[in-house]
Amino acid sequence: MATLLYRLGRVAFRWRWFVTLLWVAVLGAVGFAAVKAPAAPDDGFTMPGIESQRAFDLLEQRFPGTAADGASARIVFVAPNGEKVTATENKAAIEKLVTAAADGAQVASAVDPFAAKAVSKDASTAYSTVTFKVTADDLTGAAKTHLERAIDTARDAGLTVEVGGDALATQPAAGGSAEAIGIAIAAVVLLITFGSLAAAGLPLLTAILGVGISMSAVLALGSAFGLSETTGTLATMLGLACGIDYALFVVSRYREEREKGHAPREAAGLAAGTAGSAVVFAGLTVVIALAGLSVVGIPMLTKMGLAAAGAVLLSVLISLTLVPAVLGFWPNAVLSRRERKKGTRRGNGENGGSRWSRIVVRRPIPVLLLGVVGLGAMALPALNLQLGMPGDEAKSTSTTERRAYDDLAQGFGPGFNGPLTIVVDAKTADDAKSAVAIVSKEIAATDGVVSVSPARFNSAGDTAVFSATPATSPTDERTKQLVQTIRDERSDIESKASGASFEVTGTTALNIDVAQKVQDALIPYLALVVGLAIVLLLLVFRSLLVPLKAALGFLLSVLAALGAVVAVFQQGHGASLLGVDQTGPIMSLMPIFLVGIVFGLAMDYEVFLVSRMREAYVHGDGPGEAIVSGFRHSARVVVAAALIMMAVFSGFIGAGASMIKMIGFGLAVAVLFDAFVVRMAIVPAVLSLLGNKAWYLPSWLDRILPRMDVEGEALSRKVPTPTAGTPTAPLTPVP
């Protein structure tokens, strides 16, 4: 492996014009294809294999022309103090709005609250639900404007009018300024790390090129594979993160080889052969974690994972080819000012990394106990993890969606914000209306259901849909139990309504089903990615204990990060400091995202740091000195990479949406724990305690496993290091 990549690095350095132009041509070709490609169809969010999705599919089939997941606007009316919505003037204003809303484009129905009995007992509050034939993304500006004008007219009449639902909701951006801030901080960290503008700019330049190609490819292939800009969000984030990291390690190793006295082309080859080998295997661990998202069974998540895996593979290729090629244009510009002036080999002196590692090697047990106990304490809140999908209740009180939520909860009870949708299939029933009436009556009698709406039949009269309002809020654990109770009693209810069957769906039930499916998939997903990564790390380090230690360290850091997320976003500790207005359940996909993304990044740090220890050990250093040597050469760039990741992820904490805050906070904290506690403290402490046993591999297994030579042992024999004090190659342009 090392020898092959060494040759690749030398070839890329020598044929720098060809390699650079080739990548530019790829960017141009893919960009042109993206511009010409048709827009990807909006497949929406689907979740095969759950009851809620089956009910949605049945609605789309039996109610043609109306999307089961069509946009909706729940308009809440609150009468002025002391008045009632049933007063003549207030009632007339509400009915006028409903009539105007029903005449809007793309509207499927607008419910009169007085006809539907959607008025609170004290008559202070009423609501009307306006449903559309299309999803929120497909609503036209004219349709939204028409509804907004009707709402303004009701407000002019003196009513307080708030709007919930997704039809008029403004979706906060997840990137934009956050990405720009992350790139800016990354540039500062790189500049401080390298002390050279060129060395700081090169990783940024190549990473941005890789992201450009990745996103263009997503758009170009969108119509063929159902990809979209949303699908590419994860690809953009990880493509940028890994692209900077991988280029950073190659450039850092190039500078190190130059300091040893190697000529520029030789240094580029050695950097590709050693750091490049670590990049390859680090990239493969990320790809395993991302591609493994397909086991969850969510099509959108599978597409996001595969697109991001492609972006990471592209980052690896760019780091192994384009980075050495660009180094060929300015071989001396990436060196620090001192090295450009000095021109002689610098010895392997002490630095912050080596000094810290010596402390850990001397006191491994206290460091290990402090790290494990600290992360264990942080992980404790994860025992109370409650999965769900935060809705309008988690938004700021400055939004109309949150105010509508609060008005409904006050006027009708918390369950009105999360009604259950019951879909009754009476196609084989003798009397469809009678069967639907029986189902409705039985569900209405279920403990925890406060009311049911009148059933609405399709044109064929063989399918009906009605709503059941729980007594508790959508995120309440009792609502989840209610959904389970209704489903458990299904057989008894269906036996009374002979020939008819029903299913429970709606946003609340869908969120419950998604949370359960993700929870069921978490253990198999962990087993898959951790198992494959252990095999991969076994090939890299040729050790039994190092891969196991890496996996256990990752589990510790990800559990601690999940515990921190629960403590802040579910339990509310310090939530106000992050601008979180309302605590609630943790987003259903959060554990999967956290495991997948952090696992890949954690293995990056593991491979880069421990591979230098392995390299020193193979070249003759003792176990303790190998740890110190690995930290001397890698600690600074690992710290820089972690700081860059934290900066990128932390930028999303300032977003307006609670879910985006949660993702940004969770990933930033996970990188903090894994890079600085696990990799910088626990890993050297464990390796110090294990000594030579850390690198033990049974002889029979040693004979079976292929030799990857990540540490570049073959290169050390082929390309000897210049002796100390030997003048370096002249600091002049390379032909």
Image (cartoon, grey):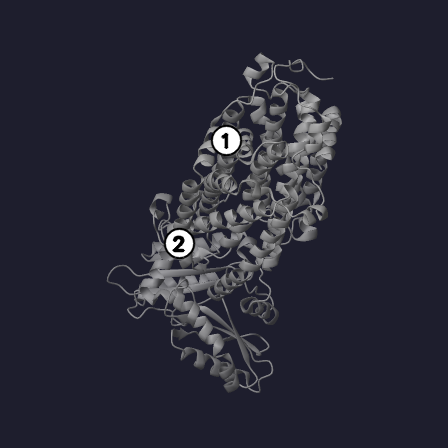
- Check disc 2 and report its element: helix, strand or loop: helix
Along the viewing direction, whichever of 149 and 291 lies nearer the viewer: 291
Q: Is residue 199 visible in the rendered structure shown here?
A: yes
Task: Give the vertical position of 193 relative to 419 (above or below).
Answer: above
Identify the residue at horizontal 46%, vertical 39% (top origin): 681
Q: Residue tagged by mark 1? A: 184
User: In the image, residue 657 lies at what x, y percent?
Assistant: 44, 48
Is 322 left or right of 120, judged from the image as shown? right
- Check disc 1 and report its element: helix, strand or loop: helix
Q: Which residue lies furthest to the left in this view?
A: 82
User: In the image, residue 79 lies at what x, y percent?
Assistant: 30, 61
User: In the image, residue 390 lies at what x, y percent?
Assistant: 43, 56
Which of the image's four quarters has the N terminus? top right
Along the viewing direction, whichever of 599 and 130 lies nearer the viewer: 599
User: In the image, residue 301 lies at what x, y percent?
Assistant: 58, 54
- What's the amino acid at mark 2? Leu
Q: Quadrant of residue 239?
A: top right
Is 170 left or right of 600, judged from the image as shown? left
Q: Could you tell me how far apart the alpha carbons at marks 2 and 1 are, in whole angstroms? A: 35 Å
Task: Give the vertical position of 117 relative to 723 (above or below).
Answer: below
**Marked residue nearer the N-terminal end (2 or 1):** 1
Is 677 left or right of 730, judged from the image as shown? left
Q: Residue tagged by mark 2? A: 380
Q: Label 2 crowding class (10 Å Cα cut-off): few <14, some 14-19, many 20+?
A: some
Q: In which quarter of the image is residue 99?
A: bottom left
Which of the image's four quarters has the C terminus? top right
Along the viewing direction, whichever of 467 and 384 lies nearer the viewer: 384
